[in-house]
Amino acid sequence: MRRIAAVLVGVACLSLSAADQARAQSRSAILLGWIRDSAGKPVPRADVNIESLHAWTRTDTLGFFKLASLDPGKVTVGLRRLGFEPQTFEFTLRPARQDSVSVTMLPNVEVLEAMKVDAALERRYVALAGFYERRARGSGVFLTREDIEQHHSSQLSDALRTLPNLQFSHGRGGRGIRFQSASVKRFDCPPDYWIDGRRVTNTDADDYPTSDIEAVEVYSGPSSTPSQFGASPARYTCGTIVIWTRIPGLP
């Protein structure tokens, strides 16, 4: 009899939990939007993110986007699209409501001119857009140009010193940054380095002046590292540091 009672209590608790989740879901907010350029034409493939909620999506061919299951409250919505000025706006999401917005993005003339001249430069802009997409998802540690400048240093390692599971060594024998290996419990794992989307070897974070860096991604282990920055099959690393250099035309 006691066992039956215990099972019934457990079922009741599960039912309450499911009911709580259903109520929370019913109170979540939805944001719909249409993004157009200054001529009123749709802007497709624009990145839309609410960084505080780790919410991200991209507009379709009609410039339409939808962000669902959002926590109500005041948020900052960010917009980015190659060839347009990055843009943010404040919005208050209401519980159990579906709100909509219409936004006009202004072209970045310098970027558009650079894109006409250099196809390789266009690929750099597309790659940097990927940085903001991964940042919105929050799978690693991300430093923007503004974050780096706050440290007022010419060395990138100064901006990385507050990150967990890192050690900084000196001397050519043990130079640079080391990640803590979860398997051996000591700081002896050099990171994989990627510069502008390409793996590089025999390098260190401070080989690149902060004045030349636009953004940095840090992944503390193979499980959190995106597949495009995966470790080489020939070596084992405890983490990955991805550096994006500055692009002409960006402030």
Image: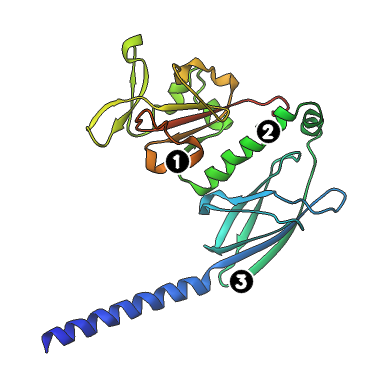
The residue that appears at 27% across and 26% down in the rendered structure is 187
- Along the horizontal axis of the image, is 113 left or right of 57? right
Query: As shown in the figure, which amino acid type bears the numbered disc 3?
Result: Arg
Q: Give x and y (percent) for residue 174.
A: 32, 15
The answer to which of marks 1 and 2 sits earlier in the sequence is: 2
Q: Which residue is at the front of the view, 165 or 186?
A: 186
Tell me the residue that label 3 is attached to. Answer: 97
Q: As drawn, is 101 to the left or to the right of 167?
A: right
Figure check: 122 above or below 170: below
Of 28 and 243, nearer the camera is: 243
Q: Are marks 3 and 1 in contact (CB under 8 Å)?
A: no
Residue that numbered label 2 is attached to: 123
Counting from the top left corner in percent of width and height, residue 27 is at 52, 72
Disc 1 target residue: 140
Residue drawn at x 44%, y 40% is 225
Assign the C terminus to one quadrant of the image: top right
Residue neighbourhood size for the residue with mark 3, other residues' Cα within 10 Å, grouped as few (<14), some (14–19), many (≥20) = some
Compared across the picture, whether 48 is left or right of 25 comes to right
Q: Is residue 12 above or below residue 210?
A: below
Q: Can you see residue 81?
A: yes
Judged from the image, the secondary structure of the residue bearing numbered disc 2 is: helix
Q: Quadrant of the N terminus?
A: bottom left
